[in-house]
Image (tube, rainbow, N blue to C red):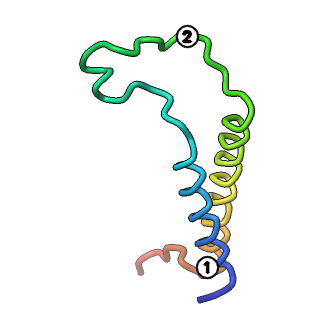
């Protein structure tokens, strides 16, 4: 296991933890079936810690994408054309 694999795993775990910290933004499937929670266009702004967690999740997701691309190039997992 190389150093970039360990960083990739750590970033993955951080994304999972941050996703679990985020609160639910919708009423869920039961609300969709019963018609409850139809405040789709209601003005609800994230404030304080919710906003920080959302931005951290987005930032780590972008970092995850770039790490995946870099690791793919470093490991040489690119596809080779069939001869």
Mark 2 Cα-neighbour bin, 10 Å: few <14, some 14–19, many ≥20? few
Q: Residue 23, image x and y in percent?
A: 53, 37
Screen quadrant of the C terminus: bottom left
Give the structural element (helix, strand or loop) at label 2: loop
Quadrant for the N terminus in the image: bottom right
Tell me what residue is drawn at x 71 percent, y 49 percent. 59
User: The residue tagged with tag 1: helix, strand or loop?
Assistant: helix
| Residue occupying the point 63% across, 52% down | 61
Please state which of residues 30 and 64 is positioned toward the viewer in this rendering. Answer: 30
Residue that numbered label 1 is attached to: 5
Total marks shown come to 2
Q: Which mark is residue 54?
A: none
Compared with 58, 63 (above or below) is below
In the image, 17 versus 55, the foreground residue is 17
Q: Would you place residue 29 above or below residue 18 in this image?
A: above
Nearer to us of marks 2 and 1 is: 2
Question: Pointer 1: residues within 10 angstroms few (<14), some, or many (20+)?
Answer: few
Q: Position of residue 11 (x, y in %)?
A: 64, 65
- Name which of mark 2 and mark 1 comes first in the sequence: 1
Q: Report the residue at 48% width, 34% height from top.
A: 24
Which quarter of the figure has residue 2? bottom right
Q: Position of residue 44 (x, y in %)?
A: 61, 17
Residue 42, which numbered label?
Answer: 2
């Amino acid at each position: 296991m190389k150093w970039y694999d360990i960083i990739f795993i750590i970033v993955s775990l951080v994304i999972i933890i941050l996703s679990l910290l985020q609160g639910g933004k919708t009423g869920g499937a039961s609300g969709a079936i019963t018609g409850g929670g139809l405040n789709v266009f209601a003005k609800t702004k994230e404030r304080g810690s919710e906003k920080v967690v959302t931005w951290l999740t987005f930032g780590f997701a972008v970092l995850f994408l770039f790490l995946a691309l870099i690791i793919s190039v470093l490991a040489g997992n690119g596809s080779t054309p069939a001869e």
